[in-house]
Image (cartoon, grey):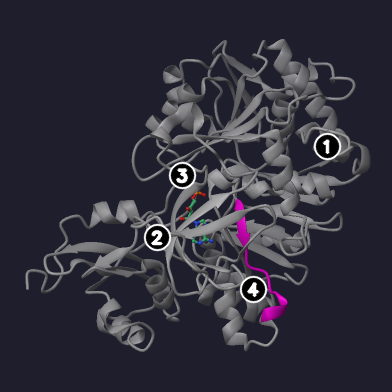
């Protein structure tokens, strides 16, 4: 017997029409080089409608890939809706990738058109001759003082919209499994792989930013998405804001800690989200701003150090809200909000819980699997294994079958490559990535835990731990440490600080002081770059 409910597809036109119909007077603000642009959702929706017909006029195929090379702006959000609502596929190019990766990705996705912020044109233009399938480059004028080449492939965004009639009526996407957006993810090996989100996966995932045991976005919120819109759809925040009717503030190109803090204060932002690096950078200046309206600081993408979250709790009264996920998981998979079982804990114990990645959000299923035997492991906070994930917004394969399916199990779960333990409530504690663990004498050392403990030192700004080959132990940990400005510390002092905090055999064999931990294109610690930098490094006593 079948249920007798309406079979309405879960598609992005719903999010668009809902925002247009219910929240037209709400504002979208974009910070620009010379001030701020303000637009109401009603005006923004008209531009989305014009953009929809513009894509038709330019002859973009029915399911053509519409690429963006943009900052977080209201115009980028126009593309977020216009491309999928007309059946096309939004492809957000990561502006921080290397030229070779960008041209590979654009060709692999067969992008037909690229929308580019004027300030980013100098980065993109030298690559365009290698982008084989792109026919048009549409420049969005963000006021940057950048010359625009005289080339017939180049169009002006505002002019294009002005020349296009607004699409009238309702956008229709019949099949909720139609592709809506794609995002490439760079692994440590091989070429970047395309993750293709569907309308259904995106709509369901958007709801997650509205749940109470999450960011709980509401119409009253003012939201500043700092996480880039080219990184897993800015963690779903833009679509979530449109669903909830929240006011959106986009940071535009200037994402320095000072600029971010100014926006948080001047717009009385209530919810924001970004990788730990952003919050580390902003920490020393927190006292200079009135941030009393902030209620959620969403943080993830890499482990949130306990000391960082605690510093925010002490200074603002709001800790960082830790979330875990990956491009393949849309990305939100777990969130670490406080639950009733934490009420009896001390503040110190709660801080430990907050440093965990959190509990799987509704509709996401996780399991821990022993990488050697393939057995499922108990959730006892002790056993550690690879996290595997399943759910309606988890990828089932990569675009064009890249990777040969090796990242997916036979029963269709995603192998995340992240190693974790989980407590009886399913609160996940990430120990490491499979490839970043240090295997010393057959036992695993968690580089993430070591980094956390090192970063708890008041004079240390950042720390990254990598494995160095060792004749006797196979691998031993080496700590790369960045000091806070004006501070000094010796390697011995770092080790003294660690001694009461970790097992003796976990103590790094060497401590190197560096100016900065290299970051990936999405602002995470690039262990790969550090491993390359220290290739051939000799540990003291390594040949013993
Ligand atoms: P990406 O697809 O670029 O977003 O990278 C996903 C990877 O980032 C995950 O597989 C994790 O290794 C790492 N990651 C994301 N969130 C967290 C977190 N909260 N704590 C630790 N690592 C994280």
Which residue matches tag 2?
370
Q: 280 or 155, which lies in front?
A: 280
User: Closer to us: mark 3 or mark 1?
Assistant: 1
Residues at circles 2 and 3 in contact by the CB criterion of under 8 Å: no
Residues at circles 3 and 4 in contact by the CB criterion of under 8 Å: no
Image spot of residue 459 (x, y percent): 42, 79
Give the CA distance from mark 3 to mark 1: 31 Å
* Residue interval drawn in magenta: 332-341
Q: 210 or 71, which lies in front?
A: 210
Q: Which mark is residue 2?
A: 1
Which residue matches tag 3?
409
Q: Is residue 168 above or below residue 225?
A: above
User: Closer to us: mark 3 or mark 4?
Assistant: 3
Labels 3 and 4: the sequence-earlier one? 4
Image spot of residue 78 (x, y percent): 74, 33
Which residue matches tag 4?
319
Q: 194 or 166, which lies in front?
A: 194
Residue at 55% x, 26% y is: 147
Residue at 68% x, 27% y is: 178
Based on the picture, tell me whether residue 340 belongs to the magenta stretch: yes
Q: Residue furthest front?
A: 1
Q: Quadrant of residue 298?
A: bottom right
Give the CA distance from mark 2 to mark 3: 13 Å
Q: Is residue 30 something one can see in this rendering?
A: no
Labels 2 and 3: the sequence-earlier one? 2
Q: 331 or 39, which lies in front?
A: 331
Labels 1 and 4: the sequence-earlier one? 1
Mark 4 element type: loop
Residues at circles 1 and 4 in contact by the CB criterion of under 8 Å: no
Image spot of residue 451 (x, y percent): 39, 71
Labels 1 and 2: the sequence-earlier one? 1
């Amino acid at each position: 017997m079948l249920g007798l409910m309406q079979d309405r597809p879960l598609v992005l036109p719903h999010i668009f029409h809902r925002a247009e119909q219910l929240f037209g007077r709400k504002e979208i603000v974009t910070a620009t080089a010379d001030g701020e642009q303000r637009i109401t959702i009603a005006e923004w929706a008209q531009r989305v409608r014009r953009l929809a017909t513009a894509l038709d006029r330019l002859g973009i195929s029915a399911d053509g890939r519409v690429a963006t090379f943009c900052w977080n702006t209201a115009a980028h959000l126009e593309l977020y809706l216009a491309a999928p609502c007309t059946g096309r596929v939004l492809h957000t190019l990561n502006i921080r990738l290397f030229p070779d990766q960008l041209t590979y990705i654009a060709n692999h996705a067969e992008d037909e058109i690229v929308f580019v912020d004027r300030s980013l044109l100098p980065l993109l233009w030298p690559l365009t001759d290698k982008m084989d399938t792109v026919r048009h480059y549409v420049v969005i004028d963000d006021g940057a003082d950048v010359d625009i080449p005289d080339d017939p492939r180049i169009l002006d965004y505002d002019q294009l919209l002005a020349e296009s009639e607004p699409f009238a009526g309702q956008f229709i996407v019949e099949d909720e499994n139609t592709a809506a957006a794609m995002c490439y993810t760079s692994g440590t090996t091989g070429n970047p792989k395309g993750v293709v989100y569907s309308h259904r996966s995106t709509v369901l995932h958007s709801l997650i930013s509205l749940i109470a045991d999450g960011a709980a976005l509401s119409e009253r919120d003012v939201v500043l998405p700092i996480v880039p819109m080219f990184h897993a759809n800015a963690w779903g925040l833009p679509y979530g804001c449109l669903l909830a009717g929240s006011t959106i503030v986009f940071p535009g190109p200037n994402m320095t800690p000072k600029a971010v803090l100014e926006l948080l204060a001047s717009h009385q932002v209530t919810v924001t989200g970004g990788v730990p690096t952003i919050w580390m950078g902003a920490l020393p200046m927190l006292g200079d701003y009135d941030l009393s309206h902030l209620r959620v600081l969403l943080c993830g993408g890499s482990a949130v150090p306990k000391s960082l979250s605690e510093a925010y709790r002490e200074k603002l009264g709001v800790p960082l809200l830790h979330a875990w996920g990956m491009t393949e998981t849309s990305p939100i998979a777990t969130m670490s909000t406080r639950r009733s079982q934490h009420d009896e804990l001390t503040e110190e114990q709660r801080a430990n819980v907050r440093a965990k990645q959190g509990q799987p959000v509704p509709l996401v299923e996780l399991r821990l699997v022993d990488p050697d035997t393939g057995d499922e492991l108990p959730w006892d906070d002790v056993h550690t294994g690879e996290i595997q994930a399943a759910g309606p917004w988890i990828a089932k394969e990569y675009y064009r079958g890249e990777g040969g399916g090796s990242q997916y199990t036979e029963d269709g779960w995603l192998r995340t490559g992240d190693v974790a333990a989980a407590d009886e409530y399913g609160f996940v504690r990430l120990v490491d990535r499979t490839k970043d663990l240090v295997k010393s004498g057959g036992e695993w050392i968690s580089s993430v835990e070591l980094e956390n403990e090192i970063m708890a030192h008041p004079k240390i700004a950042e720390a990254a731990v990598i494995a160095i080959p060792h004749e006797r132990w196979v691998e031993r940990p080496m700590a790369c440490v960045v000091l806070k400005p004006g501070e000094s510390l010796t390697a011995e002092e770092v080790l003294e600080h660690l001694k009461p905090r970790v097992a003796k055999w976990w103590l790094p064999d060497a401590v190197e002081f560096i100016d900065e931990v290299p970051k990936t294109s999405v602002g995470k610690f690039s262990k790969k770059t550090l491993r390359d930098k220290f290739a051939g490094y000799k540990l003291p006593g390594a040949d013993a």
